[in-house]
Image: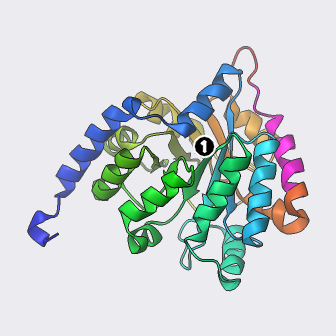
Amino acid sequence: MSATEQPTQQQAAQRGTAQGVSQTTTASKAAAAIDRARAEGRAALVGYLPAGFPTVQGSIDAAIALARNGADVIEIGIPYSDPVMDGSVIQAATTEALENGFHVASVFDVVKAVTDATEAAVLVMTYWNPVMRMGVDEFARRLAEAGGAGLITPDLIPDEAAEWFEASDKYGLDRVFLVAPSTTAERMAMTVAATRGFTYAVSLMGVTGARAAVDESAQRVVAEARAAGAERVCVGLGVSNADHVREIAAYADGVIVGTAIVSALRDGGADAVGRLTAELSGGLVRSAHA
C-alpha cells in the first residue's frame, strides 16, 4: 500500500466505530463466557499467563489449571523483548521463556491445547509488532484455527487498527482494546465502539503488578466505559487477592488477574495456580444488592 492509499487517522477511527457497531453480528467467545458468569450472578474471572513459561507444556498445564478452578477467560501472553506494560514479575517470566527458545508460532500450540481441554475462552495478549511480523491475516487465521477467541492488544489503538478490523471480522475474532483513567470521552467512545468481547479497563496508570489496594479510579473508568456504550467491562492491573476480586466484582463484569497467577506458577507450578484460582473465584459472587 502506498502512502497515498494509507487510511487517514479519521478514516481509521470511523472504520473502528463502524465495525464496533456491528459487533453483535459476530459471535464472541469472550462475551459468551462473561454472559454465562453474569447469568450465574457473578463476575467473570480472567486469568493471564505467558506462553512458554516455564516451558510451553508448563504454560499449557497452568492454563488448564486456571480453567478447571474457575477462570472463565484466559489470556495467553506472547513473550516480547521490549514490554512497555509489564511489571517485573511478568517481565522476568517472559524473559525466561524467550531465553528458553520460545517462538511466536508456539502460542497457537498453547491456545489449541487449552481450548481442546477446557471450555474457557482463550485470548492472546500481545504487543502489535509480533502480529505484524507474521502478517495480520496469517496470525488471525492461525489463531482462529487453534480455537482462540481473539486478541488483547495493549499498544494498538483503533486509529491504527484498520488491518486488524478486517482480519478479526474475516475470522470471527474478538478485539479487546484498553481504556484507562486518562482516556478522554472522545477516545472512550471510539475505543468502546471498536471493541468486541469486552472493554479492558486499566485500573491505574503504570505497569502490571500485584498491589495492596486497587486504585479507586477503576470504578470511574468502568462507569465511563458503560456510559460510552460498553456492554462488558473487565478490570485489570493491581488485582492480587480475593478481596480485590470481591471489590471489583461489585461493579465490573470481569476481574483480570495476572501477576499474582504468574507468581504462583513461578513458585509452585500448575498446582499452585489452581489453588490460587480457586481462592480468587470465591470473590466473584455478587451480593444481592450489588
What is the magenta segment's predominant secondary structure?
A: helix
Residue at (64, 47) in percent of width and height? 215
Q: Does any portion of residue 191 appear in the rendered image? A: yes
Residue 255 lies left or right of residue 241; in this view the side is left
Residue at (16, 58) in percent of width and height? 8
Where is residue 122? Give x, y as percent.
Answer: 61, 49
Where is residue 276? Give x, y as percent.
Answer: 86, 49
* Quadrant of the image occupied by residue 50: bottom right
Residue at (73, 24) in percent of width and height? 286
- Please rate how many residues cluster around mark 1, counting C-alpha atoms within 10 Å: few if below 14, some from 14 to 19, many from 20: many
Residue 69 is a magenta residue: no
Name the residue type under label 1.
Val
Viewer-side residue, 146 vs 271: 146
What residue sits right under mark 1 in the picture? Answer: 235
Q: How was this image coloured?
A: rainbow
Could you tell me which quadrant the C terminus lies in? top right
Viewer-side residue, 30 vs 210: 30
Q: Does any portion of residue 261 appear in the rendered image? A: no
Could you tell me which quadrant the N terminus lies in? bottom left
Magenta segment boundaries in residue numbering: 272-285
